Image (tube, grey):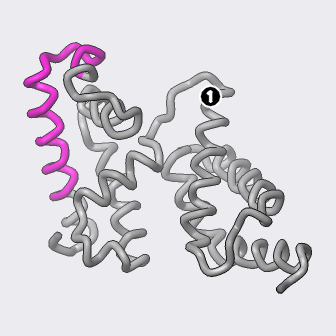
Amino acid sequence: MASDSEHTRHVQQLFVQYGAEVKYFVLSLLPHPGEAEDMVQDTFLTVTAKAHDYEEGTNFKAWAFAIARFKVLEYLRQKKREPLALSGETMELLAREASDPDSANDEVMEQKISHALADCITHLSPKLKQLVELVYRNGIKPGAAADQVGWKPEAAYVGLSRARKELKLCIQKKVGANF
């Protein structure tokens, strides 16, 4: 069994290996490169501090992305402003819903879909984007989310269905795959 310092070094090496992907993930949540770079550095420090929590053989990238997502959300709460893009959790949920389960294991395709989804979401209308955020990020039921955006519950269900279709078509165009 490796010593704690060897394990920490190994975890840091994994972070360096996946660093660019972590950076692109953070950039999808924070549109300002300076803020994103700060969050990537904070993520590296947290990954190093929590290296003992990482279990060898598990999905390092998913673990690092989760830490990055929490860092970004913590940062946004401290700044007391809403994120300009949907959270990573929202993007992951929508990407999973839009993608073929067989391609979910293909990390490259998953990354392409995630990046395409982040871009496609920016093309939704502000109210529809807010509704998607409330339902998929915050876990609010569509009827309750409808009240928050000033829509009737029926309109929220129709809007969410339309958003999923629009996002799926947009992702298909960007990724060039049918799912």
> At which x and y percent is residue 40?
69, 55
Q: What element carries label 1?
A: helix
Rendered position, 88 above or below 16 = above
Report the residue marked by disc 1.
77
- Disc 1 residue type? Arg
Task: Give the side of residue 172 with respect to residue 155, left or right.
Answer: right
Q: How crowded is mark 1: few (under 14 residues within 10 Å), some or many (20 or more)?
A: few
The residue lying at 31 percent from left, 46 percent from top is: 121
Is residue 49 one of those drawn in magenta?
no
Task: State the predominant SS element of the stretch in magenta.
Answer: helix
Rendered position, 33 above or below 61 = above
Residue 12, image quadrant: bottom right
**Image quadrant occupied by the C terminus:** bottom left
Residue stretch rendered in magenta on the structure: 146-169
**Image quadrant occupied by the N terminus:** bottom right
The residue lying at 24 percent from left, 65 percent from top is: 99
The residue lying at 55 percent from left, 44 percent from top is: 30
